[in-house]
Image (tube, helix red, strand yellow):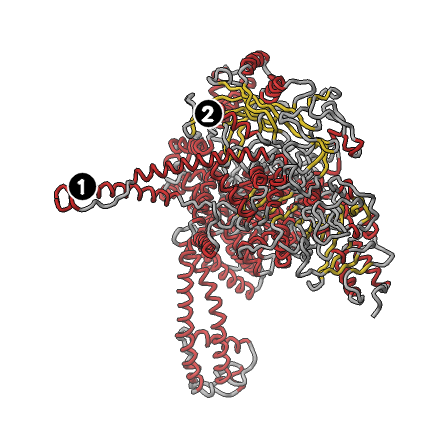
Amino acid sequence: MPSSNSRVSPSTTSLQHAAAQDGSMVGSIIEMAEARTVNSVGRIPIPDDTSQSSLWIPKNIKKKECNRFVPKAKQPSGSGSDPVCSCGRTKSKHSRTIEGETTDPWSMRTHTKDYPTDAFGEIEFVGFSQRIGKYVRAAEDTDMQKMLELLMDEWHLEKPNLLISITGGAKNFTMKPRLKEVFRRGLVKAATSTGAWIVTGGMHAGVMKHVGEAVRDYSAALSRNKIVTIGIATWGCVASRSSLINDKGCWPAQYRQLKSPKRRESPLDSNHSHFILVDNGQVEEFGVEIEFRASLENAVSKMKTDTGSDAVSIPVVCVVLEGGPGTLHTVQSAIQNGTPAVIVEGSGRAADILAFAYNNSREVEIKVTDQKGQEKTRTITVIDRDVEMKIRERIKEDCGSRNLEQMYNWVRESLTQRDMMTIFNLGQDGSAKDIDLAILTALMKANKNEVMTQLRLALAWNRIDVAKSEIFTEEKKWEQGQLSDALLTAIMQDSVDFVSLFLENGVSLKEFLTIKRLLQVYNGIPENCLLRTMLSRTRGDRANRYISLADVGNLIQDLMGDFYSPLYLREGVGYVSIDPAEYLDECMTSYSVESEADLPNTSTAIPEHSESPLPNGHTNISQPEPEFDVPARELFIWAVLMNRKEMARLFWEKLDEPIAAALTGSKLLQAMLDKTDDTDLQEKIEKHAKFFCETPVGILNECFIADEDQSQLLLIRELRNYGLTTSILLAVQADNKTFISQSCCQVLLSNIWMGKMSQENGLLRIWACVVFPPLIYLLIKYREDEKRKFEDQKKTVSAKLLQKYGQSIEMNAVQSQDHEMNDDRERLVARQSNQSPDQQRRSVRRKNEVYTRSEGVDIRNSGKTLTWLQRLMFFYNAPLITFIWNCLSYIVFLFLFSYILLTNFHPEISAAEIILIVWVFTLFAEEIRQVLTDESSNFLQKLLNYIHDPWNVVDVFTIVLFTTGTVLRFIPNDDCFDAARIILSINLMTFFMRILHIFSVHKHLGPKLVMIGKMMIDLLSFIVILLVFILAYGLASQAILYPNSVLEFSLIQDVLRKAYWQMYGELFLEEIEGQEDCTNDFALFTNNTMPRCPSNTWVVPILLGVYILFTNILMFNLLIAMFSYTFQKVQDNTDAVWRFQRYHLVYEYFQRPPLAPPLILLAHMFLLVRWCLRTLCKRCLAGSHAGFKMVFSDRNEEKKLVLWENMNGEEYIRRLKVEEEESLDSQVRTSKENIDLLTSNLEIIEEGHFSSGPRPGGTSKLPPWIEERFDFIEDQLEVTFQALDWIVKAMQETNPAAKALPPPKMEDLKKKREAEKQKKADKAQAEKEKYERMLGEQLKLHVKSRTSPYPGSQVERYPVPDDKVPWEVSFDYTPRRYTTDEVLAKPVWADPDILQSPPGKRAKLAYNEFDREYNVNRISLLGAYAVKEGLPLNPYGRTGLYGRGRLGRWGPNHAGDPVVTRWKRDDSGNQVEEDGKKVLEFVAIQRSDSHTWAIPGAIVDHGQRVLNCLQVEFIEEALGDLGGDPKMAAEQRQRMDKLFKLGRKVYQGYADDPRNTDNAWLETTAFSYHDDDGSILGNLQLRAGGTAEAVAWQPIRSTISLYGGHIYILQMVADMYDAAF
């Protein structure tokens, strides 16, 4: 073993240096391993070649050592010849040379000297699993920028997003088990979810111990990263601190936690990660770190988060557990400095006192006027007198009676800003259930001016409830684009609730969704996401660095099919040519995620974006940035592709075309099922797709119930936003049979099937017109003939839209626009003709009344007149008539084909056969037309779509057979001719089978065909099984009967023929048993001379019996059972399948030319010529057939239709949500929440039952209904007592014997109530008198003058107990020196700084007299004051601070306070009374420095009289210098002159003010200016001015909180006018 001073190995040294430099835990472990080889216990110095940290820290961080011996006032017993200094060390233990002795109060500034720190490095807690932390000893006045540099650069801490400062009891205390668990878990959750620093006192005791245990127990479970827990402790109170000292640092220092440390010392807590040990040169003096800690927290709060240009200050929150007087002071200081506090109620002592005061005080709204003269409403905290007494009692019990008034003032001042305080109570309604929620709520309440910081925290924690309650309030108005980045983060994080909240609060998706953001969304998808995989496959080898919108369009095209035209691929839109690199090179670093679990989860996740429309600073590009007309659609498509159900549903609800959007989502999701093999993912996609399959059905039915005609238009309207297709086609492509089977779709198909003909036309009438066309003009009705129906239809949509949206102005505008168009049309005709104006107008109107044919589907009643030619064309163009003519043509074709094959099929071709060949060619040409006119863009897809229909396959098969037979027929060979006859005969059979397609249109026959198709599938599977039996029996029987047969085709025929027909009863017994004329001669039976004799004939009949048993009885009955099962299974669904197939039939005949074969060839020739002309000349024959859709020429009409669809969609969504809330799952979830709440309440009751009971002075409020029941019972008892009294008197009068008996003793309730009322009044009077005495005691002890920190600074006063305030009382007093830089700059109103000189050489000022040199009155209103060592002493005693602070004069600083009052009146003008006394109102101002309310007033200026000061300050601060209207100002000045003549002196003396020090104090003269009748101040226009932030009339009450000792002055004013107080 090496000696204690031996060095470690060089290799280990280098590792130690690396660990010290970058904070590596690996290096620390190596250091600890090497440290165990040293025989010394304690510190291990590092080698001479120190690391960067070991050089930087001593150079920049200093320590304090006492260098001037100041004997302690009270020397401890046994000190003897080695006295103790005020720093806590004996004279012999002063390590440096003592520069001298002095009797001045000991002060860090004047009695210590800075030296490089000698305690820093790493600390290892021996016996605690080798826990390693970092530590440093730092002087109390260390520059905070150096400390931040130490934390960030040397200790390599990441910048926090939140600072959680824990304060409370320094001594060990117990918490209830449940509260302890919730606090620990919530604290760590808050730290880990926000990346927060936790700051405590660092000791292994009290609240610091609880925090350390929380980090130890929960950090491993809730976070993978180590939680930063910084302990800021007093160096002089750290136990075993000598083990941390080494000039070169300790790497690590081995630290042991002593079980029994010395008095006023405590060990460090092993669960903290970093320690800052604050040194002021003293030892064994707690509280040194308070000011340092506050300064560090303030410095951290001024740091900006790492969020680029949108960076915000780091929020700080103070969490309070238990604690004593110091905790009350800390909370008061934190709140005054703008730090919110979370009070953990139930933890005991100070925390419970603050919680009690918060819960039992109340807020009162007052109207104030600001400096602009605007009237606003603000709240002030009011503490009732009885509550104040109970607070004092609790303070006295928990914290002692010493400094009682000061502690109460700390509590009261903490409540002046209620928004800065949040109470956490597990059992209280309205309180947060977890400490992390309480912390977040506190930040929301406190940081009202940092809304985006609040939003980032809420979004990082995904706490929508807090965001709604604290951020998105009614009075909050969001600027345009302010929430854009937060919305982008919410979308990426799948925070559906936040996205919904942002949209509800005015975020415009059109302004939000730029091309840049959409590209960010697609390029920010995780690597392990299905969408990323699909895009990679789609992009293939041409994959670029970024995903483009064209890549997304290609993927959508692949998933949707060729019928769909994605927006990103359309020509002329501009999305195809967009280069994503131009938009994303500067902003995608924030979204480089590896997996879906790695999505942004902290407040820094919100990226910073440049909102310039042109990327990379371009001033111009080839085309302007396109806009998204429907941005919700783009985000909806993205959410569907990401399979985010809730997000997709949210954006779907924002769309105006919900049916089309849902059908598109359904199709995409169904296509995505084939892109993955992950069963779990497929299950999620199926559930997602189910929603978008069912939802459009519900909306369609909602629309159909509202208006049948309009709902049909929705189905065939061309969807520009969804692939230029239609809703009904989307449903067909998505295989949504339920949607197609709805009544709306079927009615639409029926209307399309009828063309323009009315549904009132019966089939008999139509057949009559088909047979005799002239009857068309007499019998056929068209939709335009239904006048009344048209008029009703025209008004339906407008009326419903007006009822829903109130868009009367828009409708009027549309109508006026139509009138203007008509007028323009009339004027145009007038210019182009020579007709008179009346003739021209009539001509235009006639043209408007005549129907003009529109392209595509037209099922509407246009309300116009049809010409005779249009009636004829509409009749023959109807799909029904086309179908009838095709059916008749097909029947004639079959008759012709049958006639030829039966009677006229000769080698010589006939005219009938030529007609038949031409006829079949026209059928073939029609099939070619169907393929070429398919809506798909490429031929392969057209072909696939064509063969997808089974009837098309049958058509191809029949045409191929006919072609084969016709070719063989022309070959001059008899065999070929016979083969042709056979093939054509079979072909005729297939043509007859094709006639079943005609039956599919029938309502009853169509479903039967569907059922037959399903049974055919069962039959095929049955035949496969049956074929096994056939082959088994056939082969066995043939081998037994005819062994060694010749291998030829007849052998196979015999095997199958017999076995097959034997199933149906043809047993072939003659062949099995043998015939008489048979032979076994091989030659004879091989040449077919004689049949062969069977052998073993006894075996085959047995096999035949078994075979028939299985096939006839078992298999056929199985087939019947299968058919029955299929029938029952598809019975309910058959109708839906038939309706779905009906669409294809209607679509086919809608597209088919009206001429039937063979005349259809003329139509084909016309179509071919037209196509050639359009191909050769683009302008020739402009326009095209719109197809199976409707294109609206009137955009306003289309807009109204979309709005109507949206209206019905919203109604359906509303009903859907109601059904979801009433569903069983929702009820179970609600029941579970109620059970959890009940369990929580039971635990709280159980804890309360086993606790020590209610505290003295505590309140126990009963529920209101119990109070009401008690009052009712009391009233009933009173009535009962009166009745009993009457009964007793009646009995005494009727019964003489009863008169001798004494009456029962019954208490008079009225007298009892009056006694209780008097008792309460006496108690209230006693409390009032007690309160007034307390006010006097507060002034006497000048409590406000001893509050810390000093106003406008972080300077803490030396704590002075109440009993040590007088100078006459001996006290070990070492106050701190403080004078502001403003005063030291020697302004006109300030005296010179005589503290710079030693006591004997200080300039002598004219104290206790008028100082003519400085023209200052230094005479005190209280009489002569003491002067010591050239410094005046505060006549009211010690304040904990010497110097002048913010006051300019040594000694008294004279001030004036005007109290302007009037009687408070109600709305009727009557004076308000309380407790039998009238209530006074006074003019109060809100100070801009401390935001507290006060009496207007100021310090008397140089050479100014007090009365003049009063008047000037009141006009300046309460009337805004009478600015504004000159006439009104003059009137108000006259009023003030009149009022100031009524002044009465109220008070003259000491002013208890927070600015007072030991050597400078305020003395005030207060005058009362009272308007008794309201003639002067009745309608006085108040306006804040000067240093006042606001001004208001406030009632004079003892419950209000005022600045300094102003409440005492108001008490005297109330007494003067005998007013309520």
Q: Which mark is residue 1088?
A: none
Q: Nearer the viewer, residue 1287 or 1091?
A: 1287
Q: Which mark is residue 1289?
A: 1
**Residue in the picture at 71% in, 53% down:** 274
SS class, disc 2:
loop
Q: Residue 382 placed where, x, y %?
A: 51, 35
Amino acid on which the number 1 mark rests in the picture: Lys
Q: Nearer the viewer, residue 845 or 780?
A: 845
Q: Residue 3 placed where, x, y %?
A: 84, 67
| The quadrant where residue 1392 appears | top right
Mark 1 or mark 2, which is nearer the start of the sequence?
A: 1
SS class, disc 1:
helix
Residue 1585 located left or right of residue 1443: left
From this view, report whether residue 636 is shown above or below residue 1074. above
Q: Is residue 724 visible?
A: no
Q: Nearer the viewer, residue 1536 or 303?
A: 1536
From this view, report whether residue 434 is shown above or below residue 790. below
